[in-house]
Amino acid sequence: MGVERFAVWEVEETAGFEAAWVWIDGLRVRADGSVAGQLPEPYRLSYLLETDDRAATVRLEVVCTTADAQRRVALRRDGDGWTVDGVARPDLAEALDCDLACSPMTNTMPVLRHGLHQGVGQERFTMAFVEVPSLRVVASAQQYTHLGAADGGVRVRYASGSFTSDLLFDSDGLVLEYPMLGRRVPATESVTGRERSAGAGSVRPGSL
């Protein structure tokens, strides 16, 4: 039985947000996401992500709109390797995962595949990294290390080059907190149902 989740992240690095419907069935992941950011320039982005039954990316499609352009990129991975917009990319041959810049969602796959949100381990990866908003695709060397339970989740250290950050994951392998990038927005109740029905987001019958 798979898991269906809706996740929203505040993304501090871009002064924006990410929201995604996420389906996880074993190690198979599918995500349909929307992103908006104000830094390094204003942009709006949508993506579709699919993996195989090892949580390895088989498809990533991204559309990104800025003030002066709309860009698209389509990544595919199969037994012959990666293509980007139909063009073979042998430089990505060692990669199993995509990594969309400033997207907490795309940290899920390597952690889920190796169970790093559940137990001890350290893994090195090559990622098909998609820069935003340019959508340029480059190879990126990364490492994830299980640190242990903390703050209602599990900490996993992310490292790439000289950058490190201790991410907090939930039991499904989704990011709760990514220090220096962003954090999940909890669906907490700040008003009652009755207050909401008469609040700013509702039709308020009657006259002044």
Image: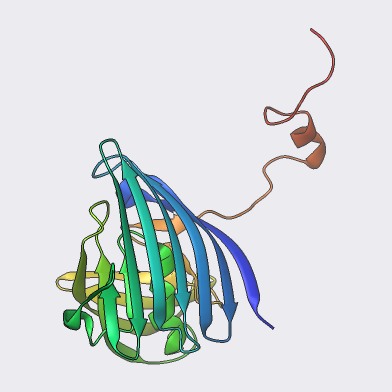
Q: Residue furthest front?
A: 86
Residue 143 appears in view: no
Which image quarter is the N terminus in?
bottom right
Left or right: where 201 falls relative to 31: right
Q: Nearer the viewer, residue 166 or 144?
A: 144
Q: Nearer the viewer, residue 54 or 200?
A: 54
Q: Position of residue 130 (x, y in %)?
A: 27, 64
Q: Position of residue 125 (x, y in %)?
A: 27, 84
Which image quarter is the C terminus in?
top right
- Indicate whether 116 appears above or below 44: below
Q: Residue at x 44, y 57 (%)?
A: 183
Residue 82 appears in view: yes
Q: Nearer the viewer, residue 137 or 144?
A: 137
Q: Residue at x 47, y 74 (%)?
A: 50
Q: Position of residue 3 (x, y in %)?
A: 64, 75
Q: Residue at x 43, y 59 (%)?
A: 47
Q: Position of residue 15 (x, y in %)?
A: 35, 44
Q: Quadrant of residue 196?
A: top right
Q: Quadrant of residue 105?
A: bottom left
Q: Quadrant of residue 157?
A: bottom left
Q: Residue furthest right?
A: 206
